[in-house]
Image: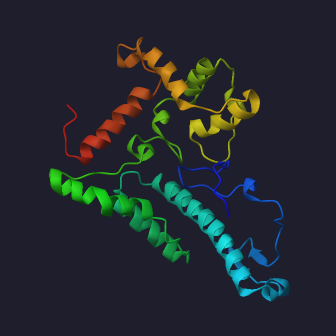
Amino acid sequence: MRDFNESSRYWLSPGIDAPTRSEILPGLRPMRGLYVHVDAGEAVFVPTDDFMRATPLWRLDVLGDIAQAVERTQQHAAVDYFRRLNQRRPDLTMDRRLAAFRRVCDEGGVVLPPNVEAPKKKIEDLYLKDLAKDKQQRFRVFQIGAAAKIKKTDAAIEELFTDEYYVDMANTAYGVKIDMTELPKDGSDMITKRLEPVMKQKYGYEFDKGRVVAEMLKRFDNWREAKDLPPGTADRAAQLFKTINAAFNVSGK
């Protein structure tokens, strides 16, 4: 299969997405054999006679492509579920959250994909541990949504602002008029991901966060005190710094 850069509406973060219809290359057609019990959440793949009559090498090639797409979708589901569980206990450390996540999956008979924790483990094994030893300090990995107590499944730095305020900045930066009611409600709830399809479909723009940042910097010049910030931003920022300070045992005073 070729590599595709198109994001689906279910995009969660870089590398965590579901396959899209753009990956259906010319000549591909639906294949029978997949059976799903919707209520029980059980499934099985039973190859057809036509499939089994094909050469073993062809079968290996096709099954490899299917397994790759399934693994991507499975990883997406695992990360999505992990994030939803995080919303319930944002006070727990990352290791305790992962342990609770694995326990819930084990109890439910869910087989996790092997790459669920790969990014975090790779960073720790290849970089952070050695650097921490050299600098005699420890590192922490934070999820900004949990750290700032942002009530969203997905969160980035933009979520320190309200969605309404960020959309207002985007409208000014692009000279457009997008209403909150136009934003999609399914898929990622990050404000930038909700803006992208509307900006593209309605105005033909590829959404660039840099343009919004430029508008934000202009507004910074008029902010002198915490009360000048958009509603809720100061509280979320304070909570974020409180979480960071507590993790490093640093006083916020």
* Quarter of the image that includes the N terminus: bottom right
Residue 20: image quadrant is bottom right
List x then y, in percent, for residue 123: 35, 58
| Residue at the spot 29% in from the left edge and 57% down from the top edge | 127
Q: How is the image coloured?
A: rainbow
Residue 163 vs residue 186: left or right? left
Residue 181 vs residue 128: left or right? right
Residue 192 vs residue 45: left or right? left
Q: Residue furthest top?
A: 222
Q: Is 75 situated above or below 50?
A: above
Front position in the image: 252 or 35: 35
| Residue at the spot 62% in from the left edge and 69% down from the top edge | 68
| Residue at the spot 81% in from the left edge and 65% down from the top edge | 28
List x then y, in percent, for residue 212: 54, 25
| Residue at the spot 79% in from the left edge and 85% down from the top edge | 54
List x then y, in percent, for residue 192: 58, 36
Front position in the image: 30 or 54: 54
Tally the numbered discs: 0
List x then y, in percent, for residue 51: 80, 83
Residue 112 vs residue 179: left or right? left
Q: Is 134 situated above or below 173?
A: below
* Quarter of the image that includes the C terminus: top left
Front position in the image: 118 or 149: 118
